[in-house]
Image: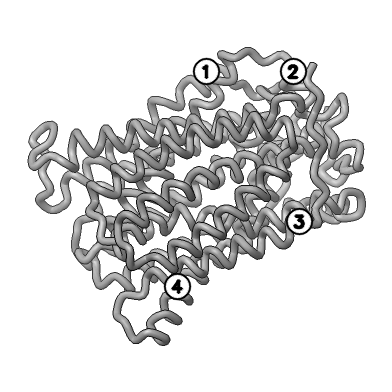
Amino acid sequence: MNREPAAVDTSREADLAPPGSALEREGTGSTKGKIVSWAMWDWGSQPFNTVIITFVFAVYITSESFGDTNTTSTALAIATGLSGLLVAVLAPVLGQNSDRSGRTVRNLRIQTWLLAALAASLYFVKPEPGYLVLGLVLFSIGSIVSEIAGVNYNATIEQVAAPRNVGRVSGFGWGMGYLGGILVLLLLNFAFIAPERGLFGVSNDEAIDIRVSMIVCGLWILLFTIPTFVVLRDRPRERAPRVGLVESYRLLFTSVKALWSRSRNTVYFLLASALFRDGLAGVFAFGAVLAAGTFGMTAGEVIIFGAAANVVAGVSTMAFGLLDDRIGPKGVIVISLVALVAIGLAIFVLHDGGKPVFWSLGLVMTAFVGPAQAASRSFLARLIPEGKSGEIFGLYATTGRAVSFLSPLAFAAFIALGSAVTGEDNTQYWGILGIALVLLAGLALLLPVKGEAPAQRT
């Protein structure tokens, strides 16, 4: 049945995912095999997050080959912030259009293929200052596509989860992503990056080892997401009339206004999650950069750390998914944010301790990032009424990306502040304080939000 976007059922009863909501109607009959196939998108798309955004390409593009540390780190922060603003503008309208057209899965498939192509295209970024802009442009476009694809993927959780197990399903998906990240990092490290001469004679001359790794990432994304598209199907529905860009935003604002009047708790959660999710993104975006620039870890050491971090993150995220269904997602998020702020401050204070500090505290920090992300997704999935998954998850992406400049800006601003205070040339470690500040602000906004009661198992 065709529904107008303005007619969003955002009452408190809808928030609790009653019979007839998307989560209740679609997820109750899912098999374990279908859940695993759905989670393969997390596994398959993970190289863009783990390899490109965090542990390999971000470290490569901020290396001395492209300029001094402060300059390249600041350029990466600016590029990340700008791409986030574009996501904020595009995500809700594209999500709304997926809902209206009933083509969420088709759109996800196209976006996934484009993401694979963009990952592979990073091969052309040579280790020269003149290629810095090209690298950041491709990196930014890929980040935008990855985020928009994530909106459509999150919307499909209603096909595989029910209120009683959405925490476990969401945590399993995130955990699968981390475990996939382990394998791809180890594969790239031992096949191309660590050896003096890797497979097919690949060496580190002109960073061929890093660049070939980008092609492998593209192939990984393309191949391992196939199971997802085998089991997921666009649900038959009456096609809604096409609307233009201006009309899409008008309908979006109408939906937001209705959401505010009928379910302010949902709006408060979207605002709070915008801040803390941006802080979580900052941990990933700049973690490996700090490992190399502040703690002196080599590219190979960063990859080994990344593999270990993904083991910790994958296991902890799956475990916290079980806790999510018992105590509710808000409890998981609060625990995670408190721990992350405390650990971030400890890393700043103890940064002179070198690699052992980053290894120990960094690994502990990764145990709390994934659980907060997965619990945030499951929190919102419990609130979405039928037929609005794309639009609401689009708003979820938009509220996050509307402030996505904060972590990069805070990271860059605290680097500059540290330089002014200490007079040192490399004050990259001061950026940790900026990330911790954003996480703390998100936690402060989250505390008044009403948590969802854990669903009863049947």
Indicate which disc, 3 or 4, sits on the residue closer to the N terminus: 4
- Report the disc number at residue 340: none
Label 4, secondary structure: give it.
Answer: helix
Closer to the eye: label 3 or 4: 3
**Spatial CA span between label 1 and label 3:** 40 Å
* Residue 58 can be seen, yes or no: yes
The residue labelled by disc 4 is 412
Q: Are marks 1 and 4 in contact (CB under 8 Å)?
A: no
Q: Are marks 3 and 4 in contact (CB under 8 Å)?
A: no
Query: Which one is nearer the viewer's eye here, 240 or 76?
Result: 76
**Spatial CA span between label 2 and label 1:** 19 Å
- When asked about the image quadrant of residue 18, the answer is top right
**Spatial CA span between label 1 and label 4:** 43 Å
Label 3, secondary structure: give it.
Answer: loop
The residue labelled by disc 3 is 447
Q: Amino acid at mark 4?
A: Ala
Query: Which corner quadrant holds the C terminus?
Result: top right
The residue labelled by disc 1 is 230
